[in-house]
Image (cartoon, rainbow, N blue to C red):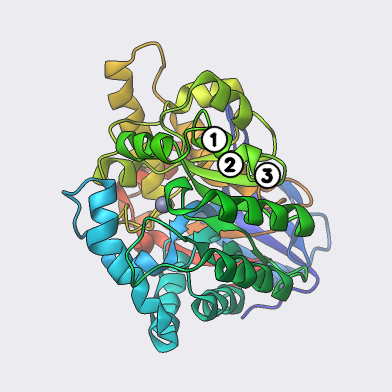
């Protein structure tokens, strides 16, 4: 571990988003960091800056660490399996039997360690993740994320209906365990507890109402899925006839926008749902690979949501997605957006600046002061080495793009969290 006390200056080609339309590129510059926090970016250090405090990464890129804003930690081992099924069939056939195994604490410890290692390997330093319904395993996941130094939100999953009889909880126990989990994690670390109802059809109205009360009582953020797949939305309508749609179910039960709220997918959204999601407390997470794999029937209209000012991020959504790389998620976001544009030309495809923004600064908004290199932001960063394929005529932005499309974790030479080397 490096020392994070005092000033350090990291030299390289620095790239980060200012906003969705602006990518800042500072070639051969220094990021000056004090106690893990960015002080300034400059092309020359002040006279007398101690040489031993300069970390020179030469021609490498220095990028903010990525944000994976929707991922299922217990599905780490089922990635890439059953990808020819549709969502509900896939959940019943693969996901529920797999997640039920996390009643075993040793299994949880083993898989969650692998999961955290892979996140870091892929350059994800900020993560918003589901666990399983098991209290003990959820605690284990929380501890492992914290031990690795990641910035994270996680919670005990809630599910009291429409699941397999071997993987379900009672309404009462679900609420009791959730409150216990939140109370256990009231301190101000970088890993925080959230409330994670799986999705509306696996939660009774009584459970959702109870979780909404907990969110209000403890100010706890909410993380769930919404407007994901056509058949899921049809069942939701049948189960909750008194509500207009899945968003209203969450909203009226205090689980959408009253506190920070992250909703994965948000593909099929009526105008009233879009209005609810425009709330600055809310964030919609685009999970392109998972959407394609479990056949939701559509692609998020990313450009439309961006133009409306809805907060957006990218999620790997493993095991629906098979790849934990958010760099790859940037590429897939652009690819899928171009496909959507072919069928719905009124919305342009997303460009690189927008997709990179979603994967870094925009997702980072949920944690505050991560995902960019403004003064006061945490120096949570990646050093990308593409020297084996580098040519002088490429700009840093083009090199970053190539890393997203054609690179992988082997290009990530160093990861920093709060200015400390992650090893
Ligand atoms: Zn998911």
Q: Position of residue 366 (x, y in %)?
A: 65, 49
Foreground pick, 361 / 146: 146
Is the shortest distance between ligand 1 and the CB of mark 1 under 8 Å? no
Q: In the figure, 56 relative to 115: above or below?
A: above
Up the image or down, 272 lies above or below 76; here it is above
Indicate the secondary structure of the residue bearing disc 2: helix
Direction from residue 197 to residue 418 in the image, left or right: right
- Residue beneath disc 2: 250
For label 3, the residue is 254
Label 3 environment density (alpha carbons within 10 Å; few <14, some 14–19, many ≥20): many
**Label 3 beta carbon within 8 A of ligand 1:** no
Q: Residue furthest top?
A: 346
The numbered mark at residue 247 is 1
Quarter holding the N terminus is bottom right
Residue in the picture at 54% in, 76% down: 135
- Tag 2 near tag 1, CB within 8 Å: yes
Left or right: where does residue 128 sit relative to residue 374? left
Q: Is residue 87 above or below residue 109?
A: above
Badge 2 crowding class, 10 Å Cα cut-off, few under 14, some 14 to 19, many 20 or more, is many
Secondary element type, mark 3: loop
Nearest to the observer: residue 37 or residue 80: 80
């Amino acid at each position: 571990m490096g020392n994070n006390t005092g000033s350090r200056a990291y030299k390289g080609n620095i790239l980060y988003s200012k906003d969705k339309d602006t990518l800042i590129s500072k070639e051969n510059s220094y990021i000056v960091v004090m106690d893990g926090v960015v002080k300034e970016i400059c092309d020359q250090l002040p006279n007398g800056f101690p040489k031993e405090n300069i970390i020179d990464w030469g021609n490498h890129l220095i990028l903010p660490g990525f944000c994976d804003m929707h991922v299922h930690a217990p599905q780490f081992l089922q990635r890439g399996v059953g990808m020819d099924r549709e969502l509900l069939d896939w959940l019943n056939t693969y996901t529920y039997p797999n997640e039920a195994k996390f009643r075993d604490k040793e299994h949880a410890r083993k898989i969650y360690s692998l999961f955290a290692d892979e996140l870091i390997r892929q350059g994800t330093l900020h993560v918003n993740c589901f666990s399983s319904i098991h209290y003990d395993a959820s605690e284990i996941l929380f501890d492992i994320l914290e031990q690795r130094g990641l910035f994270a939100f996680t919670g005990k999953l809630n599910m009291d209906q429409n699941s397999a009889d071997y993987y379900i909880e009672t309404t009462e126990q679900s609420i009791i365990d959730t409150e216990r989990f939140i109370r256990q994690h009231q301190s101000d670390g970088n890993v925080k507890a959230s409330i994670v109802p799986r999705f509306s059809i696996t939660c009774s109205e009584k459970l959702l109402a109870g979780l909404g009360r907990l969110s209000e009582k403890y100010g706890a953020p909410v993380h769930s899925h919404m407007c994901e797949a056509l058949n899921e939305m049809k069942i939701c309508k049948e189960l909750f006839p008194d509500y207009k749609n899945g968003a209203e179910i969450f909203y009226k039960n205090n689980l959408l926008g009253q506190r920070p709220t992250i909703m994965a997918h948000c593909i099929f959204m009526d105008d009233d749902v879009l209005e609810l999601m425009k709330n600055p407390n809310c964030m919609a997470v685009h999970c392109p690979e998972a959407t394609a794999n479990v056949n939701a029937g559509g692609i998020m209209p990313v450009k439309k949501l961006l133009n409306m000012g809805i907060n957006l991020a990218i999620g790997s959504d493993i095991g629906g997605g098979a790849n934990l790389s958010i760099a790859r998620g940037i590429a897939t976001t652009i690819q899928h957006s171009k496909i959507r544009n072919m069928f719905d030309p009124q919305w342009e495809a997303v460009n690189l600046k927008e997709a990179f923004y979603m994967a870094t600064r925009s997702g980072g908004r949920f944690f505050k002061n991560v995902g960019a290199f403004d003064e006061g932001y945490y120096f949570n960063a990646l050093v990308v080495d593409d020297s084996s394929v580098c040519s002088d005529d490429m700009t840093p932005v083009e090199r970053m793009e190539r890393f997203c499309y054609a690179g992988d974790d082997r290009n990530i030479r160093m990861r920093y969290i709060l200015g400390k080397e992650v090893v």
